[in-house]
Image: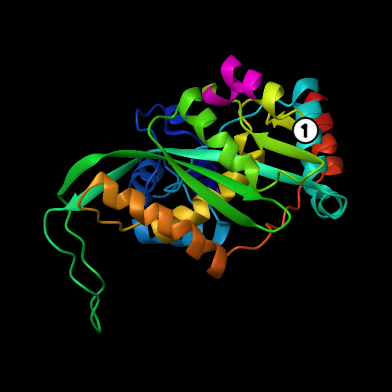
């Protein structure tokens, strides 16, 4: 139990300057603090495993501010997800849009070594950079299908240039619910003015601050990148663009399906209430 408590403390809390624990540093700290006269790092690893503690692992998290503004914006987005299929039946569509900016076109200095029995694939560490590509993705929520565009820049002008193509497929829709985050190209006055002037049927919904994870297009780009960008090797920027343009139709054929979204408005309101209280 004492080792578990120590693992749950920050190293700074016991007078150390380390930023995080390892099994070896925990074993040393346990001995210095008199928790055990001798203890090996493997014993510490067994204690942590039984307690389901993993101090060696971590992940980034963007903390939202669950206030009334968050509640109002999140409720509109979640309402669209909950009603995407019924909206589609009456001629309305829910779209999610997001960008994956600055995808590097990397060429490995030596060819990768293919997988063999008993040997995993090996990829050359050194690479040559051939520039970057900004990839814009649209997700049709009720079908799970996507469409992608390669942008020259991640700005309002480049976004406005593809918006007519992005919305053309849904020109017969009575209403388009467009969900995206509060990125600078989305919030820019020229973008908002363009949509209000030429596409009055578009209802723009911004995700709350620090809650871009409410945009299902983020999930889409994560799934797309895992299948079509990891381990990539491109001899030029144009080759990467060709790859991206060929990849999103294949994603639709092989993988596209509506995301199972389980976080409802009721759960969101309970979460905000707990935070505020």
The residue segment tinted magenta is 185-194
The image quadrant where one finds the C terminus is top right
Residue 232 in the image, given as x and y percentages of width and height? 30, 56
Taking the image as shown, residue 137 lies to the left or right of residue 68, namely left
User: Would you place residue 250 above or below residue 157 in this image?
Assistant: below
Taking the image as shown, residue 90 lies to the left or right of residue 129, namely right
- Image-quadrant location for residue 65: top right
For disc 1, the marked residue is 201
Q: Determine the residue positioned at 60% across, 21% down.
A: 187
Viewer-proximal residue among 13 and 200:
200
Total numbered labels? 1
Residue 78 in the image, given as x and y percentages of width and height? 78, 41
Residue 95 in the image, given as x and y percentages of width and height? 68, 44
- Image-quadrant location for residue 128: top left
Viewer-proximal residue among 122 and 41:
122
Taking the image as shown, residue 258 lies to the left or right of residue 127, namely right
| Magenta residues, dominant SS class | helix
Viewer-proximal residue among 20 and 191:
191
**Mark 1 Cα-neighbour bin, 10 Å: few <14, some 14–19, many ≥20:** some
Residue 133 in the image, given as x and y percentages of width and height? 35, 40
Helix, strand or loop at mark 1 = loop
Q: From this viewpoint, is residue 51 visible? A: yes
Color style of the picture = rainbow
Viewer-proximal residue among 271 and 75:
75
Residue sitting at the far top: 189
Q: Determine the residue positioned at 79% across, 31% down.
A: 272
Q: Determine the residue positioned at 88% across, 50% down.
A: 90
Query: Is residue 120 within the magenta segment?
Result: no
Taking the image as shown, residue 81 lies to the left or right of residue 98, namely right
Q: From this viewpoint, is residue 39 visible? A: no
User: Would you place residue 124 above or below residue 169 in this image?
Assistant: below
Q: Determine the residue positioned at 21% across, 66% down.
A: 122
């Amino acid at each position: 139990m004492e080792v578990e408590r120590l693992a749950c403390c920050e190293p700074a809390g016991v007078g150390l300057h380390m930023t995080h624990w390892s099994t070896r540093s925990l074993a040393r700290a346990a001995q210095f603090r008199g928790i055990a006269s001798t203890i090996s790092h493997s014993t510490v690893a067994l204690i942590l495993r039984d307690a389901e503690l993993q101090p060696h692992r971590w992940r980034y998290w963007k903390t939202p501010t669950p206030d009334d503004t968050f509640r109002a914006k999140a409720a509109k987005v979640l309402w669209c997800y909950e009603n995407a299929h019924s909206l589609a039946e009456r001629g309305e569509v829910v779209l999610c849009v997001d960008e994956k900016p600055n995808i590097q076109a990397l060429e490995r200095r030596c060819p990768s070594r293919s997988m063999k029995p008993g040997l995993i694939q090996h990829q050359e560490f050194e690479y040559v950079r051939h520039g970057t590509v900004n990839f814009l993705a649209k997700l049709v929520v009720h079908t799970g299908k996507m469409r992608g565009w390669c942008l020259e820049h991640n700005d309002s002008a480049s976004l406005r240039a593809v918006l007519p193509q992005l919305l053309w497929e849904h020109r017969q829709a009575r209403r388009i619910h467009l969900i995206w985050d509060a990125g600078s190209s989305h919030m820019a006055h020229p973008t908002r003015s363009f949509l209000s002037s030429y596409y009055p049927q578009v209802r723009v919904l911004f995700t709350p601050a620090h809650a871009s994870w409410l945009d299902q297009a983020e999930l889409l780009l994560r799934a797309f990148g895992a299948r079509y960008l990891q381990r990539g090797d491109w001899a030029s920027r144009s080759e990467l663009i060709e790859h991206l343009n060929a990849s999103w139709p294949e994603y639709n054929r092989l993988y596209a399906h509506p995301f199972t979204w389980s976080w409802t408005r009721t759960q969101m309101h309970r979460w905000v209430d707990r935070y505020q209280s």
